[in-house]
Image: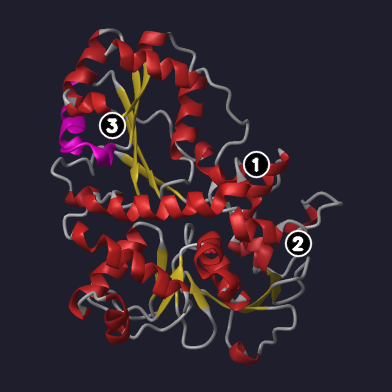
């Protein structure tokens, strides 16, 4: 226990960037039990260490424990938390909770019997509270952290504080958002850099090794994180990685399940389940037609890689700019709104707006006559009328 707390304090005293992820200011930190889930590599740990180190507390009152520490192979989480509390502990951050068996039951027990102890935990995006043994759904305030937006990428890289916008503002046809930006701001200068390496904060630490680190990220998610899914057979991890590469060569596309099954060796009856697993792990995004009830057995109408960094990494020289544009739009809008496939156009958002995504010469031909429809154009700095610059959707959070 003493070693755990020494490790915790050493981490908390490390120098960290001033930059904070968007979710930091949205979390109600006063809640007694807080959960933060999200894809691996999006900065959950750094964000919680920033918060924990900002607390004006003595060493014995706060702690950070990672549940993939070998300490928890032989020690109970519940017993550790109780001992921490009895020694004067008030706030504890538990990282990687999905690495510990029965984590939800033990957290529930401690939460119920020690009301003075605040618990904040992080876990993989695959966490589904409804499928955990301990019923935390009525107790925990749950948040999900998406990857970095274009705005956040600029903030981290250049230590600036650019404003956010909303879908309502972008679709209003007014110029208010653009007027809030610095007069010398040129949104396209670093846009391509973001598309290639900007989604995951850790890649900015060593851009030269991003290819290797992304490979490691994908393998870790598939071979370790996804093993926590009860329905996933870890023996099929190699086939899952193969499926990722097959998808990367074709996205965005309307999947032929029989053809995908043939190329990957995954039985067609389980392929839809595996696509759902990859979406839960935030490696791909599935798009379904509006107005149709979605079930796990339903074939998606379109498949995308989850973000443009993955698209460039896995697609290589075959990465198409049209795919990148649509992937960027989907990845930036989906954390805040429901995105579906409309009868005409590329995306229907919140059953209200229809968007057609393309280059600067894109016309309204595909969405002509559709109410609340907009053309999203790459390679333009400002929006005019029903045309909105693609980069602006990277300022939603």
Badge count: 3
Crowding around mark 1 (Cα neighbors within 10 Å: few <14, some 14 to 19, many 20+) is many
Q: Could you tell me residue 364's position as x and y percent?
A: 67, 87
**Most extreme residue toward the left, as rendered?**
133
In front here: 251 or 243? Answer: 243
Q: Is residue 117 above or below residue 306?
A: above
Q: Could you tell me residue 151's position as x and y percent?
A: 65, 51
CA–CA distance in space, label 1 to label 2: 17 Å
In percent of the image, x 68 and y 43: which residue is there?
157
Q: For residue 104: magenta? A: yes
Q: For residue 202: magenta? A: no
Q: Is residue 108 visible?
A: yes
Q: Is residue 258 above or below residue 33?
A: below
Q: Secondary structure at mark 1?
A: helix
Task: Residue under label 3, please give it.
Answer: 67
Q: Is residue 224 left or right of residue 37?
A: left
Task: Residue under label 2, please give it.
Answer: 188
In percent of the image, x 41 and y 74: which residue is there?
247
Q: Earlier in the sequence, mark 2 or mark 3?
A: 3
- Which residues are the magenta region? 97-113
Q: Quadrant of the N terminus?
A: top left
Q: Earlier in the sequence, mark 1 or mark 2?
A: 1
Crowding around mark 3 (Cα neighbors within 10 Å: few <14, some 14 to 19, many 20+) is many
Q: Which mark is residue 383?
A: none
Q: Is residue 210 above or below residue 2?
A: below
Q: Which mark is residue 156?
A: 1
Residue 272 falls in which quadrant of the image? bottom left
In front here: 33 or 315? Answer: 315
């Amino acid at each position: 226990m003493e070693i755990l707390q020494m490790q915790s304090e050493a981490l908390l005293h490390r120098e960290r960037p001033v930059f904070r992820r968007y979710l930091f200011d949205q979390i109600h930190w006063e809640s007694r039990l807080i959960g933060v889930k999200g894809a691996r590599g999006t900065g959950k740990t750094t964000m919680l260490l920033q918060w924990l180190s900002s607390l004006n507390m003595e060493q014995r009152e706060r702690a950070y424990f990672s549940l993939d520490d070998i300490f928890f192979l032989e020690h109970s989480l519940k017993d550790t938390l109780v001992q921490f509390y009895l020694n004067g502990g008030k706030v504890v951050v538990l990282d990687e909770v999905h690495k510990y068996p029965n984590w939800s039951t033990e957290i529930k027990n401690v939460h119920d019997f020690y009301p003075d102890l605040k618990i904040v935990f992080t876990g993989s995006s695959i966490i589904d509270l409804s499928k955990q043994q301990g019923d935390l759904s009525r107790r925990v305030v749950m948040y999900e952290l998406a990857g970095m937006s274009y705005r956040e990428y600029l903030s981290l890289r250049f230590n600036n504080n650019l404003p956010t916008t909303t879908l309502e503002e972008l679709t209003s046809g007014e110029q208010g958002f653009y007027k809030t930006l610095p007069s010398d701001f040129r949104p396209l200068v670093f846009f391509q850099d973001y598309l290639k390496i900007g989604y995951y904060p850790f890649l900015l630490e060593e851009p030269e090794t991003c290819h290797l680190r992304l490979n490691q990220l994908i393998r870790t998610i598939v071979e370790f994180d996804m093993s926590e899914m009860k329905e996933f057979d870890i023996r099929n991890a190699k086939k899952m990685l193969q499926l990722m590469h097959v998808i990367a060569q074709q996205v965005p596309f309307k999947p032929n399940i029989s053809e995908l099954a043939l190329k990957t060796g995954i039985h067609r009856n389980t392929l839809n389940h595996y696509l759902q697993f990859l979406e839960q792990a935030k490696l791909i995004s599935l798009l379904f037609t509006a107005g149709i009830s979605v079930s796990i057995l339903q074939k998606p109408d379109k498949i995308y890689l989850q973000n443009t960094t993955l698209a460039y990494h896995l697609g290589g020289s075959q990465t198409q700019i049209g795919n990148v544009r649509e992937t960027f739009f989907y990845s930036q809008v989906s954390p805040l709104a429901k995105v579906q496939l409309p009868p005409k156009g590329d995306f229907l958002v919140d059953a209200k707006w229809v968007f057609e995504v393309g280059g600067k010469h894109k016309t309204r031909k595909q969405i002509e006559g559709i109410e609340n429809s907009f053309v999203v154009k790459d390679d333009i700095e400002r929006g005019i009328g029903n045309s909105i610059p693609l980069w602006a959707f990277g300022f939603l959070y």
